[in-house]
Amino acid sequence: MTCARFLVSFLFAALAMSGPVSAHAQSTEGIAALVNDEPITTVDVRNRMRLIIASTGMAQVDEATLARIQDQAVRGLVDEHLQLQAARDYEIQVEDEEITASLLDLAQRNNTTIDAIIADLQNSGVDVSTLRHQLEAEIAWRILVNGRYGSRVRISEQQIELALERLAASASQPQYRIFEMYFEVPAPGQEDATVQRVVAVMNQLQQGAAFPELARQFSDAPSAASGGDIGWITESQLQPEVAAIMPMMRRQYEQSGGRGALSNPVQVPGGYMVIALVSVRDGTTTLQYDLVQISLPNSAVNEDSREAFQRLLDQEPTCTIAENRIGEIEGAILTDLGSISADAVLPQIREALEPLTRDQNTGLIENASGLQALIVCDRQIAGPGVPSRDDLENQLRGQQLSLQARRWLRDLRRESTIEIRE
């Protein structure tokens, strides 16, 4: 009997036990994989499989399901060994206090305690060291990625403004609370293996397993660390393939009486996604401007004042510069309008403001009382769950770091010697 087949049969029998496997049974264990000559034992794989089963609350576990769980356990352990080996190369050491803090964060996200988690694991025959090892790899990898790429990732004001523009365009769209799982096809020719992983997870979801715990163990997305939770989001912020199914998911959500909706697997560039829609709310965000208005009454309008007004606007002055230079336009009046909603201004003014970003102006606007122009001191989306500029910058930075992390891990897999014992 091969090592892999023995492991599945052994674990299937051992699942009936209430506690850890006996020392005699452990003595029969062998090597499941080698990662750059560093062994992953069948004990390691069995404990990870037990952790996956315990943490996801799988209702039914047959031998076919165990085989898929074993593949996931080995895959996860291989990646963690690569990450920790890289950490050692860079002399990165994760302290016990950091692992405990991460464990506390995990407990708080699941509305429980560390002691309760440890007790649940022990009841399932899993030593807490298995979970701590997983958390250690997550922390070490995060430190490594930030250290290697953090200083190289630059988020420009233009990128932030573009993100704000997308938010502004979607301000009135419905908002969805979404959990995600992403399954990467790591290399050409491995799509079938990825599809099998997706099918196994979908089967467990249909049997009542918890989405967040499955996401934590199986998802290849950075959101796996938070159980796949990506918070409130609009269709325009989703990948096009996922956005296309949201109207159908909303109908399912409403038909369920608000209990939630689960997507079928969606093929996206590089892999597959599964989406859980847990809540919906109508768009409650508004576009807010901080504005300065320059007015030139009819009594002060002449050729010279008009030209001076136009010269100032052509230079795209900031609100502060405009305030300092208003004296160049004879008879002009500068008014700080403060923060004002786009819905509160006249339609023609709203239309003129719509394409503008910070420090841009409407140009000359003629009306019955004379000439006027508006300068945008700031522009932001206001409403529940709307990110600040700093939040947007952190989100964009996280996306860039995540992309670099996936590429680096792929390089480590390709450059390493990995032997899976069949």
Image: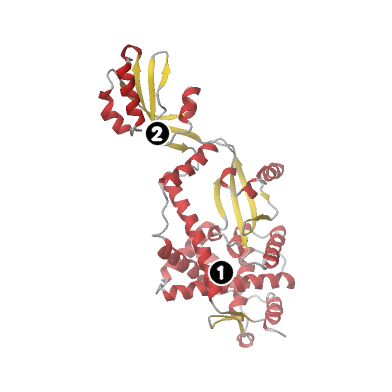
* Residue 231 horizontal/vertical position (percent): 54, 49
- Residue type highlighted by circle 1: Ala
Q: Quadrant of residue 37?
A: bottom right
**Image vertical order of residue 92 relative to residue 336, above or below:** below
Q: Which mark sits nearer the N-terminus, 1 or 2?
A: 1
Which element carries disc 1, helix, strand or loop? helix
Q: Which mark is residue 41?
A: none
- Residue type highlighted by circle 2: Gln
Residue for point 58% across, 62% down: 220
Q: Nearer the viewer, mark 1 or mark 2?
A: 2
* Residue 337 horizontal/vertical position (percent): 37, 26
Q: Which mark is residue 119?
A: 1
Q: Nearer the viewer, residue 296 or 123?
A: 296
Q: Nearer the viewer, residue 113 or 240?
A: 240
Residue for point 62% across, 85% down: 29
**Image vertical order of residue 378 relative to residue 210, above or below:** above
Which element carries disc 2, helix, strand or loop? loop
Q: Which residue is outermost to the top?
A: 299
Q: Quadrant of the N terminus?
A: bottom right
Badge 2 is on which residue? 360
- Is 320 left or right of 21, judged from the image as shown? left
Q: Nearer the viewer, residue 126 or 406?
A: 406
Residue 123: tell me if it is visible.
Answer: no
Residue for point 53% across, 61% down: 225
* Residue 349 horizontal/vertical position (percent): 46, 24
* Residue 64 horizontal/vertical position (percent): 74, 71
- Is 378 left or right of 6, judged from the image as shown? left
Q: Quadrant of the C terminus?
A: bottom right
Q: Nearer the viewer, residue 17 or 385?
A: 385
Residue 14: tell me if it is visible.
Answer: yes
